[in-house]
Image (cartoon, rainbow, N blue to C red):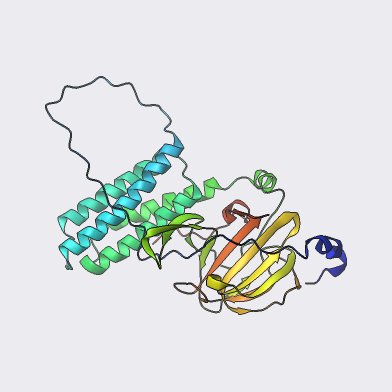
Amino acid sequence: MRRAGALAAMWGLTACVTAPTGVTTWEDDRLEGVAAQAAARPLPDPDAPRLRLKAPPTSPDPEVVAHDLELTLLRFTARRRALSQELGESSGAWPAPMVQAWDDVLADVERALGAALLPRRLLVQVRVTLEAELELTQRRHGAGAPALATRVRQIYTQVALQLRRSFPEPERRARAAGDARFSWPVSPQIVSSAFGFRRDPILGARRVRFHAGLDLAGRQGDIVSAAGTGRVVQAGWQGGHGRVVTVQHPGGFVSRYAHLSRILVPVGALVDPGSPVGLMGSSGRSTGPHLHFEIYRGSVPVDPLEVLDSHIAFAAGP
């Protein structure tokens, strides 16, 4: 575990490096989703003259597809919530307006998945949003039609397949990351919140903040391991992150492990991939037991999915 001789020169230069600060991070509340008011779509005028339109491009712009899908998810969350309040609780068959809302969003998601390879962040958002909204809908209106559940499972499968396709080849990923390779800090690897902008679960839907890492689901007390070779530069309480361990790695990379229930390493300890650094918990500003995992290159946060091993346990089923 200790490589004092091999790493002494490097740590002489990096021992004073501290973890980046000033970036607000928080945990996704999977049962609330992201809220935004849905805009009503005007119906076309049946008497309007028909126009001869140019043929659409054969390959849709992936950025446009991703942007439209993100708005679709936001609007659906707001629409589902408004309908639940309007319709109240029921049992048996879902009310027709709720069925229509789900038919619409599933059709939009299916089209987007068939049109382009979506960003990993958005793929995780699709999975988490549909899981959360389906659970909330079923709480108020029952299980719903089996055909709808089948469509949702098929979308989960498409999401899982796109996630596997979206990981770069090992050589290309290593070059993009400056030859840095990191291991997953927990097992299994279940992503519950992705890297990027998200609604703040504590301050509410009107506050959107940057989530500078991954939230990895697990149980209280699960072992959290170092993602790579390095030196512990911080171990202790750190505000909203609760109990945190920060590790400095070669190449200017830093990894951070937050919301731990217990810290297992002191400052200055040398660690290897797989070395236990703490136990999973919910300390600090947290909505439940999980690991908030960050990777920085210098002072810039990096999407951990860009530099982690490609084996992600993102199940295709519900």
230, 20: nearer the viewer: 20
Nearest to the observer: residue 217 or residue 214: 214
* Camera-side residue of 154 and 47: 47
Name the quarter where the N terminus is drawn: bottom right
Percent from the top left, x then y, of residue 237?
A: 60, 76
Task: Give the residue at the far front of this rendering.
Answer: 22
Q: Residue at x 62, y 59 (%)?
A: 295
When the figure is inspected, residue 30 is found, relative to residue 175, above or below; the finding is below
* The residue positioned farthest toward the right in the image shown: 5
Left or right of residue 74: residue 267? right
Q: Is residue 274 left or right of residue 16?
A: left
User: Does residue 145 show up?
Assistant: no
- Which quadrant of the rendered structure holds the C terminus? bottom left
Residue 199, above or below 44? below
Q: Is residue 40 above or below residue 89?
A: above
Spot the residue most to the top.
52
| Residue found at x 39% / y 48% | 70
- Left-right relation of 37 to 234: left
**Residue at (72, 55) in percent of width and height:** 252
Q: Position of residue 204 (x, y in %)?
A: 37, 64
Q: Residue at x 23, y 21 (%)?
A: 51
Residue 63 is situated, as x and y percent measured from the top left of the image, at: 45, 38
Numbered label tally: 0
Q: Position of residue 159 (x, y in %)?
A: 44, 51
Q: Nearer the viewer, residue 252 or 22?
A: 22
* In-image side of 89 versus 108 (left or right): left
Residue 231 can be seen in this image: yes
